[in-house]
Amino acid sequence: MKKKTVFLLISLIVYCYLFFQQSIGINVLIFNGIVITCLGVLDPSLLRQKNWCLVAVGALMTATGAFLYGSVLSCIGNVIALLLLANLSREKEASLFFALIQTGFNYIVSPLIRLVNGIDKLTDATDKESRVFNMTVGTLLKFLIPSVILLFFFFVYKDSNPVFSNFVNQFAFDISWDFIQFLLFGTFLLYFFFNQYSYFPLVNKDRTSVNYLSGINEKEISLFRSIDTEYGSGILMFGLLNSLLLLVNYLDIQYILFAKKDISLYSDYIHQGVNSSIFSVIVAILVTLFFFRGNLNFYSKNRKIKTVALIWIAQNIILLFTCIHKNYSYIDAFGLTHKRIGVYIYLLVTLVGLILTWIKITRVKSNTYLLRTNTWSVFSILVVSSLFNWNQIVFHHNTTCQPSIERDYYLENLPETSLPFLLKNWGELPVDRYGWASRPFKEKLMCKKKDFLKRYHQKKWQSWNLKDDRIYREIKQTEIN
């Protein structure tokens, strides 16, 4: 049996044992350690590949976040890291952007292509192709038919023999239809994880796309028919946009520094202002990329258009900082939420994009460079974000800086994180002002506590994480006091 097949089976067994009917916990960290080790043993040369090692570290960091906090964000980051790792194991020199596209292609398109190719070989094949296909089908049936018959008799014996049934039930999970579905899904995931395919058009595009622009490209297509006309249009556009944004930034800064804020209009001011500003900055980056995609970078008179474009980028950076201030002011007035943290993350990603666009223009980089570097920046921010306990940060900030926040908010939005605090202090906290509570607060609080303790005691070691353990110990300490 091939080494890859052995590791696939080991990973599948571990996957089923760690994740079937389990929640987020130490299982994520253990699974990542095992599959990364399998990839490293299969191909030791991967350990000398910088991109592969960085993504492997990112996978372990997000898995650590899952172990510490049991957060969905950590799991999302971990899934993305593992998908990237799978393709980088096949295409060692691939950039992160193209690796992400390729691995998505593997899971979404590749199964359909294989199915169509299989049907084509059945209906129209040469003798040689037919023999190869029949051997493949025969090998598949060799294992599939005994497995199906084994499962059939397994269920028959389990239902008819109490002694055998009790023996099976002693294990961590029971073999049922739910487990079979889980097993099939895991087989699909892990098969394509260990059997990534290279799609030549994507691989070739990645290998031939350089980060630097080398000179005039005679094949470049311009909407303006000539580079002189494109240059003139760019100067006019960036000049007008700079004038408009200068007025916007001036009014924003004047409002921040001198205007008296109407608290009743603050929510609209923040939401509309931040959302529109972020969207405008993204469009600004796309417009800049269009004009500086190629030949205009080498135009003999391009100094002026580069200057006005860089001023435009600088003004957009100022716009982002006013958005940061708006978000900070909103948090200061109404408290911290996950969405307001998300705004900071969006602003950070956009700020990095603007800085990289500045570098692209000043150092004559290609648009592909921007795609590659921005992919790395987004991935890095996602990995680092998974190491923070955002629920605890929101809870700590609001209890420390926002004493006016009602107790119902904590119970509904941070039900587990806030449980120990509410059990101890619920009688001293502000009451819901809007009267939407359908039951007395203490009754709801006790139900939340009961539900948490029930889930905690039902968890097996695979689902253990530090956050739930801390909450449980604090609850028990509150009961003792």
Image: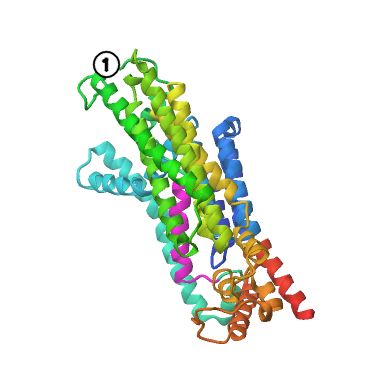
Give the answer, above or below, for where 406 lies relative to 340: below
Q: Which residue is mark 1?
A: 218
Give the side of residue 399 with respect to residue 263, left or right: right
Give the side of residue 190 with respect to residue 279, left or right: right
Q: Which residues are magenta?
A: 174-193
Find residue 97 and report its image quarter.
Answer: top left
| Residue 439 locus on image (x, y percent) | 54, 86
6 or 90, which is in the foreground? 90
Query: Is there any visible trace of residue 144 in the rendered image?
Result: yes
**Residue 394 highlighted magenta (yes or no):** no
- Mark 1: which secondary structure? loop
Q: Residues within 10 Å of mark 1 (few under 14, many from 20)?
A: few
Query: Is there any visible trace of residue 83 in the rendered image?
Result: no
144 or 473, which is in the foreground? 473
Looking at the image, which residue is at 49% across and 39% down? 318
| Residue 2 locus on image (x, y percent) | 51, 42
Disc 1 residue type (three-letter): Glu
Type of colouring: rainbow
Outermost residue, top side: 300
Give the answer, above or below, for where 339 lies relative to 290: below
**Residue 189 highlighted magenta (yes or no):** yes
254 or 85, which is in the foreground? 254
| Residue 227 locus on image (x, y percent) | 26, 19
Magenta span main SS = helix
411 or 29, which is in the foreground? 411
Give the answer, above or below, for where 133 lies relative to 331: above
Looking at the image, which residue is at 44% across and 56% down? 269
Looking at the image, which residue is at 61% across and 80% down? 445
